[in-house]
Each structure stands twice: as structure tokens, then as C-alpha cells.
Image (spheres, rainbow, N blue to C red):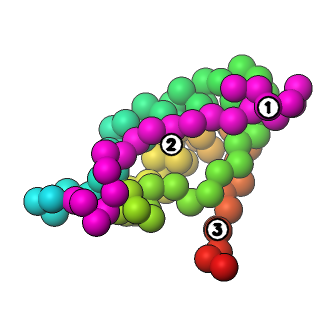
Amino acid sequence: MPVEPVLYVASMVAQHGIRSAARAGRPPIRYDALAQCLAKLAQHAGRLQASVHLPRIGTGLAGGSCDVIEPLIRQHLADHGISMTVYDLSEQ
């Protein structure tokens, strides 16, 4: 969704619930859904010749593992030549 002529926002939904509601030891993150979101994001970013800026996703209330999420980001964005910046958000 364009916010300004050269600024877009992409919403990715890849979790079901939040960590406190997780049952049976399964975290709310859905890695397959995240992979699909990242693949679609890469398509759009490539078409627009855009860079991607995002916080560390999927590890907070989604309960995901950095060991799984970082390779997904690399596979779907960096390995396809998409310039990206991942930000660490600090709590205030």
C-alpha cells in the first residue's frame, strides 16, 4: 500500500494468537505463513526496486525462534538481491 510516492507499507500476518495463549507448546508464529509473506514481499520489492526495512519480526508475542526466522528472511529477501535493514526496537 503506497503511503507516499516512494514509501510503501506491507502488512504480513503470520501468527495465530499471542504467546500467552499458546497451547500444547506450539508458538503462535506460523513459519509457513511467514515464508509466504516474505516471498510475496520480495516479489513486490523487486518489482518496485525497493529496499525493505523491518523490525525483528516473529520473536516477541509470536514466540518464534530467531534461528528459524533469520534464515527465512535471508532466503526470501537477501538471497534475491533485495536490500534490507532489520531494526532492533528497544523498549522505553
Q: Classify the position of the C terminus by image quarter.
A: bottom right
Locate residue 48, reporting x and y percent.
Answer: 76, 23
Left or right: 50, with 22 as reference point: right
Q: Nearer the viewer, residue 37 or 70?
A: 37
Point 61% across, 24% down: residue: 43
Mark nearest the camera among 1 and 3 is 1
Left or right: 78, with 21 as reference point: right
Q: Secondary structure at mark 1?
A: strand
Q: Amino acid at mark 2?
A: Gln
Mark nearest the camera among 1 and 2 is 1
Q: Amino acid at mark 1?
A: Val
Residue 3 circle label: 1
Q: Residues within 10 Å of mark 3 (few under 14, many from 20)?
A: few
Q: Is residue 72 in the magenta section? A: no
Give the magenta range: 1-22
Q: Nearer the viewer, residue 5 or 35?
A: 5
Q: Classify the position of the N terminus by image quarter.
A: top right
Residue 66 in view, yes or no = no
CA gap between label 1 and label 3 equals 23 Å
Q: Which residue is mark 3?
A: 88
Q: How many marks?
A: 3
Q: Which residue is mark 2?
A: 75
Q: Is residue 7 in the magenta section? A: yes
Q: Amino acid at mark 3?
A: Asp
Point 36% across, 46% down: residue: 15
Callout 1 touching callout 2 (CB < 8 Å): no
